[in-house]
């Protein structure tokens, strides 16, 4: 069965990951529109790259490059989880779950700013998990502030992940105001250089407009195709079972693991709720939730005991993803 094959850390699983990556994208590749634009920077950061690149990739190249990035991120995430022993056992499940979740909606299958930002999320997690044993977190908080600032240039809603730095300091460290300020200084460093660039291009008066989207009113409703609700049914069930399993094993885990999962929950929550900053709603925003969700999924599938239940759930998830790829055009 699929899930049981990934429960151990077998290098041959990479081959199956590549096959799954292809299977979850072939439906969209067959029906994808001819012209797809790509935006790797926010409009306010376009001064940094004054060339047109939106249509530089063909549709096929776009899907292929996105798949390669997803595979790299899946392997990095798998290394992260095993390195910090978040699941208690070496496994390839985080990579499997990330590749699966990254195929959930068709906008996830293309190159996008949130997909690029997932590299920064993984980088942040390496640094955040190091806070638990680190004695002086000021340099780490400074680095994290810079990472969030870089992510904000690529995709502005990423700015809300700055809250994760302070939440991590609350969870992992005793209060030290210098560490809290260090993150602010790190963020300000990047935007200081951006302000200088604006000044040199005689556009410093526009610099304050960068922050206007933060005042956007949170929407009362979101228009999502009902197909998207249906494909989320197995996702919601798996997440619910994961939290039940986490609750059962919570106090049996090491303190660092418990704190790490608390942090992952806040990352999932903040990343999901930050979508409103963009004037136009795009499903690809929720790729930012894929990393913590993949770890939650991996935890459930690693510790679930009834193989018929968890294998059936995963099979239904795969079938629903593939089915809706072929039936949403």
Image (cartoon, rainbow, N blue to C red):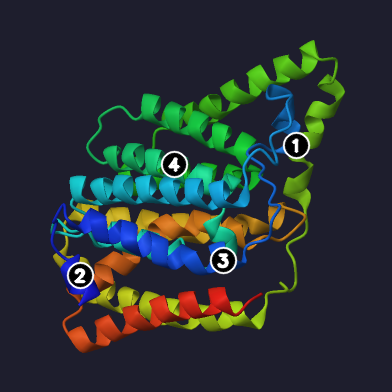
Say what secondary structure mark 4 lies in.
Answer: helix
Q: Above or below — where is 198 with respect to 164?
A: above
Per the rendering, the mark at residue 43 is 1
The answer to which of marks 1 and 4 sits earlier in the sequence is 1
Per the rendering, the mark at residue 119 is 4
Residue 163 percent coordinates (x, y): 52, 46
Eye-nearest disc, 2 or 3? 3
Per the rendering, the mark at residue 30 is 3
The answer to which of marks 3 and 1 sits earlier in the sequence is 3
Say what secondary structure mark 2 lies in.
Answer: helix
Q: Examine the rendering and report whether any part of residue 221 can be seen.
A: yes
Eye-nearest disc, 3 or 1? 3
Eye-nearest disc, 3 or 4? 3
287 horizontally vs 222: left or right:
left
Distance, label 4 to label 2, CA atoms, is 24 Å
Q: Above or below — where is 188 with respect to 125?
A: above
Distance, label 3 to label 4, CA atoms, is 28 Å
Sort mark 2 into few (<14), some (14-19) or many (20+) by Cα contacts within 10 Å.
many
Whether the residues at callouts 1 and 4 have beta carbons within 8 Å, the answer is no
Q: Which residue is mark 2?
A: 302
Distance, label 2 to label 1, CA atoms, is 42 Å
**Which residue lies at the image location 30% right of the left edge and 59% below the top edge?**
17
**Which residue lies at the image location 33% right of the left edge and 65% below the top edge?**
296
Distance, label 3 to label 1, CA atoms, is 31 Å
Whether the residues at callouts 4 and 2 have beta carbons within 8 Å, the answer is no
């Amino acid at each position: 069965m699929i899930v049981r094959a990934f429960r151990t850390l077998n290098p041959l699983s990479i081959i199956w990951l590549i096959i799954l990556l292809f299977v979850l994208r072939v439906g969209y590749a067959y029906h994808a529109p001819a012209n797809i634009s790509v935006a790797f920077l926010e409009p306010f950061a376009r001064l940094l790259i004054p060339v047109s690149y939106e249509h530089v990739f063909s549709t096929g190249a776009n899907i292929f490059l996105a798949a390669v990035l997803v595979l790299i991120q899946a392997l990095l995430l798998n290394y992260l989880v095993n390195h910090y022993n978040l699941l208690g056992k070496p496994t390839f499940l985080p990579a499997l779950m990330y590749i699966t979740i990254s195929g959930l909606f068709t906008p996830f299958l293309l190159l996008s700013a949130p997909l690029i930002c997932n590299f920064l999320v993984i980088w942040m997690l390496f640094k955040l998990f190091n806070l638990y044993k680190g004695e002086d977190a000021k340099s780490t908080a400074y680095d994290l502030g810079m990472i969030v600032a870089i992510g904000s240039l690529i995709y502005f809603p990423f700015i809300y992940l700055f809250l994760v730095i302070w939440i991590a300091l609350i969870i992992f460290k005793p209060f030290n105001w210098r560490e809290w300020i260090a993150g602010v200084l790190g963020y300000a460093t990047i935007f200081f250089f951006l302000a200088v660039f604006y000044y040199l291009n005689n556009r410093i008066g526009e610099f304050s407009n960068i922050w206007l989207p933060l005042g956007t009113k949170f929407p009362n409703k979101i228009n999502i195709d009902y197909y998207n609700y249906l494909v989320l049914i197995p996702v919601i069930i798996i997440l619910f079972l994961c939290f039940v399993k986490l609750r059962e094993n919570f106090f049996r885990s090491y303190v660092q693991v418990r704190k790490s999962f608390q942090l992952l929950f806040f990352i999932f929550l903040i990343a999901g709720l930050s979508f409103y900053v963009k004037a136009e709603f795009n499903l690809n925003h929720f790729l930012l939730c894929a990393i913590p969700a993949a770890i939650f999924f991996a935890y459930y599938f690693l510790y679930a005991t009834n193989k018929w239940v968890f294998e059936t759930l995963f099979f239904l998830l795969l079938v629903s993803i593939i089915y809706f790829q072929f039936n949403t055009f």
